[in-house]
Amino acid sequence: MSKIKIIHVIYSFEVGGIESVVLEMLNNFDKNKFECHVITITNDNLRMHGLLKDDVVLHALPVGSRNLKTVSGIFKCFIGLCTMFSKIKPDIIHAHLSAFALLFIALTIKFSNNYAVNVRSIHTAGLFYKRDKTFVDKIKISLEKLAMSLVNMKIICVSKLVYKNAIRDFPSKNIQKRLILNGIDLNRFSPERVKNVSKKDFSIHETSPVVSYVARLSQEKNHSELLDIWFEVVTTLPDAILVFAGDGPLLNMLKLKVDKLGLNNNVLFLGAITNVPELLRISDIGVFVSSYEGFGLVLIEYLAMRLPVVATDLEAFQDIVKDGEGAFLIPIHEKEKYVQTIISLLRDPELKNSISNNGYLQSQKYFAKEMIAKHKAFYLELLFRTSGDD
């Protein structure tokens, strides 16, 4: 029996939540039954390539992210995708894109006369998926509806909130929707397995309290607001260190703000890193102050590493952990509450241990093996059943 060929299509292979989910699936599908490929639309953000197993094939299209919006870049991307689809002849194409990019994928599938089963994952509850939509948001939703209708595309929702939004935004029963919660490698994110690491490995003094934020440096992640909070924290705890692990368009602006606030000795920029478990192992608290999330993969990573968490009170986070039990969930505008909560956790070992132990128990529900098994079952169901809805 020939192997089932699966192609995952993503924008890049930079360090991030979507890429981490795709990486887990690519590396852990049964290679005796499945042949796994990943296509990146751009070729200049492939930092996670080195984490792929040898039996997974990465195809990076010959287009840089800066050139993707040019006519020549779009043409190269179109030809490249059509060529890949025709060459590999996949049984399943799984897209992790949205709006214009999703429609672009659908058009290439249609043009290349590919007869694969088509699936797309929705990874966020923000952007144009939010309840209150602008005119532009409605156009983007319309583009997605068109894309899915062109190739009979199914939806995988990564959280209860995303699933609820999908039912609202794509109410047609002709669009099949499936809830499959994200998961992480609980063997990799385990304090018992991450050993022989110290704060000195990150150029931090061993006695300094460490608060880490693993997130792309972009507007919705609220790094700037966190710096205002951190300015107040260090007036009480002058040796405390805030670590930003991630890259993004706000890097220079944030560095300027750190300098303006006089926090150069209290804020560390690591850039996009792949040794996240090691960073979390030497951290005392994990923070996650995003304005919106579809799931919150990093939140699970914090909890699995037994870190107490201080995060925004997002619905996606509330589905994972209760406020005051495994984490403290606080509205982003309540900055004084953030300050006092962070200080209390750093000063009170008993409170810190209580919160982190409760959070750890919650994290054990989100094992990547279960996520992978559910994707596999859905793929097989779609391959042998061409109609129906949940």
Image (cartoon, helix red, strand yellow):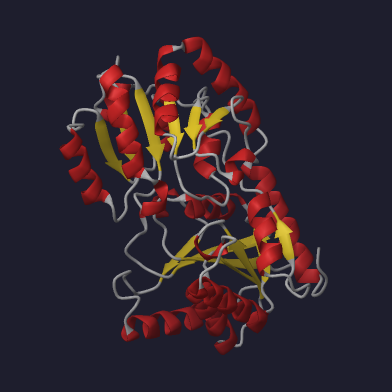
Observer-nearest of 32 and 366: 366
- For the image, the number of numbered tags is 0
Observer-nearest of 164 and 296: 164
The answer to whether any part of residue 237 appears in the image is no
Observer-nearest of 192 and 220: 220
Give the residue drawn at x 34%, y 80%: 73
**Residue 14 x, y percent position in the rendering:** 39, 55
Q: In this picture, is 82 found above or below 212? A: below
Quadrant where the C terminus is found in the figure = bottom right
Q: Quadrant of residue 93?
A: bottom right
Give the residue drawn at x 55%, y 22%: 356
**Residue 265 x, y percent position in the rendering:** 19, 28
Give the residue drawn at x 40%, y 33%: 335
Observer-nearest of 363 and 319: 319
Q: Quadrant of residue 163?
A: bottom right
Q: In this picture, is 245 found above or below 158? A: above
**Residue 380 x, y percent position in the rendering:** 75, 63
Give the residue drawn at x 50%, y 50%: 292
Quadrant where the N terminus is found in the figure = bottom right
The answer to whether any part of residue 105 appears in the image is yes
**Horizontal side of residue 164 vs 282, given as left or right:** right
**Horizontal side of residue 6 vs 377, given as left or right:** left
Q: Quadrant of residue 4?
A: bottom right
**Residue 92 x, y percent position in the rendering:** 65, 70
